[in-house]
Amino acid sequence: MNWTPTAVAWLPWEAAAFARARGEGKPILLSIDAPWSIGCREMDRVTYGDAETAAAINATCVAVRVDADQRPDLADRYDFGALPTTAFLTADGHVLGGGTFVAPARLREALARLSVASGVVGPPPPAPELQDDTDDLERLTDVVFATFDEQHAGFGSRPKFAHTAPVRLALNLYVESGDPIMLERAARTLDAMGWGGLYDEEHGGFSRCAAEPDWSGVQAEKVLPVNAALLDLYVYAGTVASNERWFARAVDLVHFIERKLIAANGAWRFTESAEPGRQFSDANGVAASAMLHAARVFDDEALGKRAIEALERVLLASYKPGGGVAHSAAGVRGLLTDHVTMATATLDAWESTGNIVYRMMAEELMHFALRTMWDADCGGFFDRAIEDNDPPGVPPCRPLKPFVLNCEAAIVLRRLAEAVNDSVFGKQAVEALAAVRGRAASHGPVAAHYLLARRAVLR
């Protein structure tokens, strides 16, 4: 990863950094960023580029830097809402505190306080999980739609993300009940995103988010997973409502992804400016699924063929018999995100082509996830293989069960149960949902993922 040069003595996430922290009695300053993030580059320039701040960091901490794209498991685990992540850890990997963008003076103040307290602060107790009875699906649906922005459309306030799950849920409810309010919420959001500041009319593609509720202050970064998810949403919405305008925006997205995000080998890059090695399995899985869905709806055989070719390119580079898929050709192995998205994409490829090899691959990938990431005691998937991905000497992280990924895993398990006529997959789909049910209400608009999965699994 090409970071902006600073005077901070950054170390990678490896045993030497944690051994040094233990040996010197210092906390870890963890910086998680991505090369496409303007906010990350700004913090490099303003904060880490400040000589006084850099000297304070080097004197009081062991500074560790992680690429969010290469290690999505660590980015999720230490997420404070946005990039960059700025976190303080003990030498055993426990979180002491953190945030996102931190100005130089504020970071120096935090370092001073941490220096005084670092000898007495221990690992925090595990965060209690909510025990809400989210089996009350109507109440959980109310939780999701209470976050709808009546003035500007969309879900949530600031920063305003292009949440696709609540829109898809609204469309599903409209199809089932004919409720015009649900269609109106979906339509207003689709129009606000697709013909507002989030979409780049000149160069194509959607930005990740907007800083303000009215969709202004758009962050310039355009990443593959966001654009692929929105492509899939506009195709689905156009189908539900027979809306040619939404179909047209979906076609625009196909062109953007194929022209601006295509790599020399036929797979997809994470961003327009991504280096050749930054072709990630999970992002390509999401894109392949979206392209295959678009190809079916638009009856575009050539598009479907290109999607299959891209999927095969990534599998060829990342798949290892008996070892699942890696995050990239030379990336970490055993991440749940890669196995769920690639299993979904290969199931989509099987449904599109009838080629049983793709179905067998989906089955193998989920068997690997069940064997290495499944919680045998409580059900549900951990975010990565229980055999830790980190090198010896790096403290093991407390197991994390990602909410959205368990919902998506439940859906793909249910599809596999039907595809191969195996009720065990169906049982595990139910258990994966049950494992995150108690946390659903705390996720606001993102709780729509649980409701969508619940409908798919228990239909």
Image (spheres, rainbow, N blue to C red):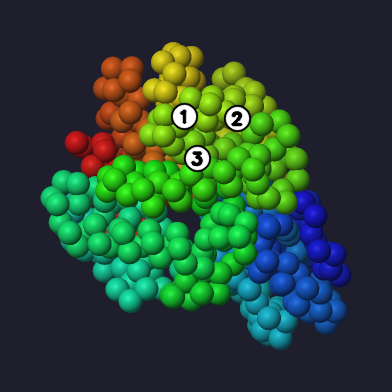
Quarter of the image for residue 85 reads: bottom right
Mark in the foreground, 3 or 2: 2
Compared to residue 441, the image places residue 308 above or below, namely above
The residue furthest top is 356
Q: Is residue 98 above or below residue 375?
A: below
Q: Quadrant of the C terminus?
A: top left
For the point 52% across and 47% down, the residue is: 253
Q: Residues within 10 Å of mark 1 (few under 14, many from 20)?
A: few
* Contact? badges 2 and 1 (CB < 8 Å): no
Type of amino acid under label 3: Val
Q: Nearer the viewer, mark 2 or mark 1?
A: 1
- Distance of mark 3 from mark 1, alpha carbons? 19 Å
Q: Residue at x 34, y 36 (%)?
A: 411
Q: Nearer the viewer, residue 322 or 228?
A: 228
Between discs 3 and 1, the one toward the N terminus: 3
The residue that disc 2 covers is 310
Badge 2 amino acid? Ala
| Residue 276 in view | yes
Q: Which percent across, then down, holds residue 186?
A: 30, 58
Q: Residues within 10 Å of mark 2 (few under 14, many from 20)?
A: many
Q: Is residue 438 left or right of residue 78?
A: left
Residue that mark 1 sits on:
300
The residue to which callout 3 is attached is 286
Query: Tag 3's secondary structure?
Result: helix
Relative image position of residue 219 (x, y in whole percent): 59, 67
- Residue positioned 64% across, 23% down in the render: 316
Density class for disc 3 (Cα within 10 Å; few <14, some 14-19, many ≥20) is many
Choose mark 3 or mark 1, whichever is in front.
Answer: 1
Residue drawn at (41%, 58%), measured in percent from left and top?
Answer: 163
